[in-house]
Image: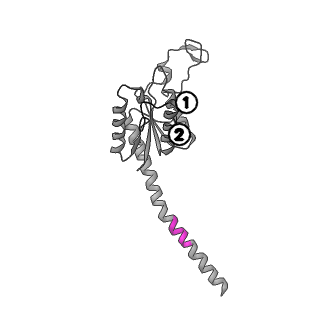
Amino acid sequence: MARVYLAGPEVFRPDAVAEGGRLRRLCAVHGLEGLYPLDGGAAEDTAHDIRVRCIAGIVRADAVVANITPFRGAHMDPGTAWEIGFAEARGVPVFLWSSDPRALAERIPGTPGHDGLRDADGHLLEDFGQPENLMIAPPGVIVWPSPEAAVAAAAEMLALRHSLRLGLLPKVLIALAASIVAGYVARLVLHW
């Protein structure tokens, strides 16, 4: 069964454990095992324990489903941003979702300047039409509107990847067997 790491600020909610259960059940409906950051945790966990557990979850995962909904401000949870970067650096596919589809430039008040929108401090506002910084959600990347949609997309991609591997394996084995037989026949012919 493919595993999906469930990144996001849900761990800070008052109902964090229940929400984790809901997200894991959502994964199970799609034939996936959901890995929630609080799984296996304890009340006495240190910051180090939590970090190690989250990293281990991403390492075990076949994909990451990440909630990039604004959290405590205009941007996403910074811990989730780190987890996305770690997953991408490892080549783990990431599926983003946000309950706020507005472009980042729509969420941050700005004033037009000669070179684009500027925030209250005079800093240039990123305006690529995506709901988060281009390093998280580059143009062209789909940001799904819900965890349901992101999990479904992850399940579809993982199922396709699995079926391609299964379909390719018999072909590789047949080609390998044919190569071995051809090499054996060629040696026999050469020795006659």
**What amino acid is labelled 1 in the image?**
Leu
Dot 2 falls on a residue whose secondary structure is helix
Of pointers 2 and 1, the one earlier in the residue sequence = 2
Q: Amino acid at mark 2?
A: Ala
Q: Position of residue 65 (x, y in %)?
A: 44, 38
Residue occupied by mark 2: 87
Q: Report whether 103 appears left or right of 18.
A: right
Image vertical order of residue 29 relative to residue 129, above or below: below
Name the residue nearer the viewer: 103 or 11. 11
Residue 139 seen in render: no
Determine whether 105 is above or below 60 in the image.
above
Residue closer to the observer: 51 or 152? 51
In the image, the segment drawn in magenta is: 172-178
Foreground: disc 2 or disc 1: 2
Residue 53 lies in magenta, yes or no? Answer: no
- The residue tagged 1 is 134
